[in-house]
Amino acid sequence: MEAVAQRIKHSELRNKVMTAEQAAEFVQNGMVVGISGFTGAGYPKALPTAIAERAKKFHANGQAFKISMLTGASTAPECDGVLAAADCVSFRSPFQSDPAMRNSINAGHTNYADMHLSHLEQQVRFGFYGEMDLAILEVTGITEDGKLIPSLAIGTNNEWLKAAKKVILEVNLAQHEKLEGMHDIFFDIGSPPNRVPLPMTRANERIGSPYLECDLNKIVGIVMTNSGDRNSKFADPDANSKRIAEQIIDFLAHEVKAGRLPKNLLPLQSGVGNVANAVLMGLQDSPFENLLGYTEVLQDGMLDLIISGKMTSASATALSFSPDALQRFYDHIDELRHKIILRPQETTNHPELIRRLGVIGMNAMIEADIYGNVNSTHVMGTRMMNGIGGSGDFTRNAFFSFFVSPSVAKDGAISCIVPMVSHHDHTEHDVMFVVTEQGMADLRGKCPRDRARLIINNCSHPDYRDMLKDYFDRAEKSGGGLHTPHLLNEALSWHQRFVETGDMRLK
Amino acid sequence: MEAVAQRIKHSELRNKVMTAEQAAEFVQNGMVVGISGFTGAGYPKALPTAIAERAKKFHANGQAFKISMLTGASTAPECDGVLAAADCVSFRSPFQSDPAMRNSINAGHTNYADMHLSHLEQQVRFGFYGEMDLAILEVTGITEDGKLIPSLAIGTNNEWLKAAKKVILEVNLAQHEKLEGMHDIFFDIGSPPNRVPLPMTRANERIGSPYLECDLNKIVGIVMTNSGDRNSKFADPDANSKRIAEQIIDFLAHEVKAGRLPKNLLPLQSGVGNVANAVLMGLQDSPFENLLGYTEVLQDGMLDLIISGKMTSASATALSFSPDALQRFYDHIDELRHKIILRPQETTNHPELIRRLGVIGMNAMIEADIYGNVNSTHVMGTRMMNGIGGSGDFTRNAFFSFFVSPSVAKDGAISCIVPMVSHHDHTEHDVMFVVTEQGMADLRGKCPRDRARLIINNCSHPDYRDMLKDYFDRAEKSGGGLHTPHLLNEALSWHQRFVETGDMRLK
């Protein structure tokens, strides 16, 4: 009880403490539920399991029990995973990465709307999706005056607290008390026609409050938890990742030398995953100093740049660390709490700010085609992987936008450079650089055929290069338009071949 | 000479007046030339022909003569047309619509980079494309202190004046002197890391200067012209266009009633073309008052809304009127010059402003697919039509984004709703509404399969509906992922069939 009083300083709210099972009783079939969580950080740890158990009981009695589930981004097995396994999520948005949820989506059990992360909060606020019945959010604690101290992610929490009719909080004792003060929530983002400029001109500027706010009458339950975040481990950068990182860093150094970039570059955004993380690790040995981060998810690579002093400070909406990095974060928290700012995803991903700050965006892709279109979401055109996340918000508005991937996957059976991507998430109009371990293609200001020659020659794997050249040659000679030559009946044949034979290569 | 003195009030600059042929001598093979013009307005009338003649002489002597040509957007036969016909444009960006230029692009003679219109100016300023050798701009006149009075379009002119090493002006006596004061040029848009918020919170707010500015030492020649703009006539709205307009207006009225839109809506953007123009004409008889326009090109429909008093004022980068509408504009110019604001395209199309103001975007499309992806640019996947223009700038950042098209083209031989678009300009993540004369599909917050059912049932033409249902049914049963069911070897078969048989319908 001492721990409860320590974390819930508002005395009346302490009366709302209950078990997860009790709190789950507030969840009814058909509800729209806003849940906290962003890239495996800051999601509720106890309630999703209790909801899943409740759903199973209903289902066992032949009763319907499904919810619509909106989050910041991806959560974890204890949240997306258990709910998908209980088959109680009828609708999911805007991003997920849990294997069970992915299977539920691809099996047609869960309807998934894959959205730009900067769009979701405002569209809920605009009333596009009706009312939100309930919000379930993890927090670190509650102040004496009832303000909420966020945990390792903010995501959409500020909006869910406003939109939801009822709120259930999970106060997680495992979240460090010194997180208090790291957050920066700008509440006045508003709706048209009454919007004003976002008052930020530097990536490390604070423009809001360190606390989330909520009508306390909406809080119907508080559940105490004591459990860490997902914290999956990163792979050590392999030779391919290192080669990709080197090329990006060489290019940036070249741009600094040419006077087109400041010596400390521009604020860096890095997508989620091992390759993107490797680029940041590569910057550790780069000539650049006083770097700034303006990203969505702050991972190990960026953390270590801050700890080493290479990076002055960083802004993000979530901290998603490996277990080792989380320990380093705690070891340096007195210093880091002043150098890391966590904001709502509507702010971190806002086109206005990304364009104004001139962010350098680096994102992973599933595949690119010879004309520079990028698929970030679909496997073989039909199966959802995770979602577009913030990659569109950053890519469209970035100063530079890089898409990175090894040139092949599945031991060479999949080429990540194809004649036509099987799904389009970023079009030829948005993609500036494609980088694989083979090389880099600078697509800026080039016509499609020049892009094709660059991508094929610089980025494709040697096993596929002649096949791509052959496709492009025959497309040029096929009698169609020479702006974007394609063979319409072959454009997606590589994917079809993989589906049929397990290999994109011709036998 | 009186007319010259009247329009060129700066006495020294009057000494720079020369013939178009003389001015064309400044143009050399290989030059990067920035030219004014946006949707058939404000392009140079004399110099392009003189440059084309010069190119022909070079070519006749076996000498190379080609330029890289950057504009605001499309120009006209006397500009894009004559230059393309002389085969002297090696590179073209960011938008065009002239038949000769289109042919040159699709024949592989002109390399065309199809860019978001908001991206071009800043990327030139960032130094992505090297130096600009020459700018050729039409203006209405020059003030005593050497400031330039723009004509019917601003487009990229402010940036070309800064970027170019030399400048040639065309002073067009046919442009109305009362255009002076209608323009609003915000110069401080800058480059990262030194950018600040754009100080605009209302669509009709002025934030800059009515004049373009230029280092006068860069002006190497001035050519006097007296010739009107392209001014192509609009088709009278047909039954299909009217039906599309009605549905959009009904939806907006519904949203006002539900309290999700202000009574005077939000600022309206309308793409170029007959259908988009018809929607604006439809608003004439709508219940909405005090409308605002925040668009790229102001066409007849929006002009008449202002003249009738339905619309309070409008912001655009170009005025592109039919001959009749141009006359109405001149008839009311004393009043209209205070109600219409012309700005640089970097401002009109800026994501920051479109999102802040909450613009309602309405754009034409070539085709949409069952999942809500839109092709705005390519005919049968390979041939460039015009370009993406500002449709991406508006769609991504709009409060509502509508894509409109009749459900079939070429007397029914082409379905504008297809299994998969043959080129992707706007992805499923950006497109909110698809509207044909058959009906409207509200795609917001829906999973791909729900979108498919809506688009097929509501928007497709009855001649194609069963074919689309059959494709979708078989795709669902094909064993691929059920997130976005596709038959990879059939997805583009409708386009291939059209290429082969001239008809998408099965015989």
Image (cartoon, coloured by chain):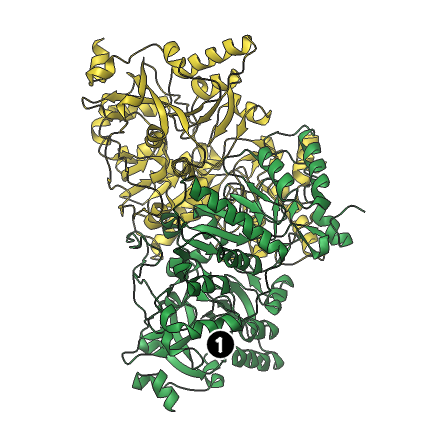
Chain colours: A green, B yellow
Q: Closest to the observer: A387 or A292?
A: A292
Q: Residue under mark 1: which chain is it in?
A: A
Describe residue A484's horizontal placement relative to residue B258 as left or right.
Answer: right
Q: Is residue B229 above or below residue B464?
A: above
Q: Quadrant of residue B327?
A: top left
Q: Residue B228: give x, y in percent of width and height.
A: 35, 18
Asked if residue B321 shows in the view, the reply is no
Describe residue A6's horizontal placement relative to residue B108 as left or right.
Answer: left
Q: Closest to the observer: B342 or A346?
A: A346
Q: Closest to the observer: B343 or A297?
A: A297
What residue is at 49 percent from the left and 64 percent from the top?
A299
Q: Residue B63: give x, y in percent of width and height.
A: 54, 12
Asked if residue A478 shows in the view, the reply is yes
Q: Is residue B353 above or below residue A152?
A: above
Q: Is residue B169 above or below residue A6?
A: above
Instruction: Tell me the kind of residue under disc 1.
Output: Gln
Q: Does dot 1 land on a helix, a strand or a loop?
A: loop
Q: Residue B346: give x, y in percent of width and height.
A: 36, 38
| Direction left: furthest residue | B144
Q: List the residue tagged with mark 1.
A: A28
Describe residue B240's horizontal placement relative to residue B164 as left or right.
Answer: right
| Direction bottom: furthest residue | A1
Q: Residue A38: give x, y in percent of width and height.
A: 47, 66
Q: Is residue A1 above or below residue A111?
A: below
Q: Quadrant of residue B164?
A: top left
Q: Quadrant of the N terminus of chain A?
A: bottom left
Within 10 Å of disc 1 (Cα), the crowding (few <14, some 14-19, many 20+) is some
Describe residue A204's horizontal placement relative to residue A449 as left or right.
Answer: left
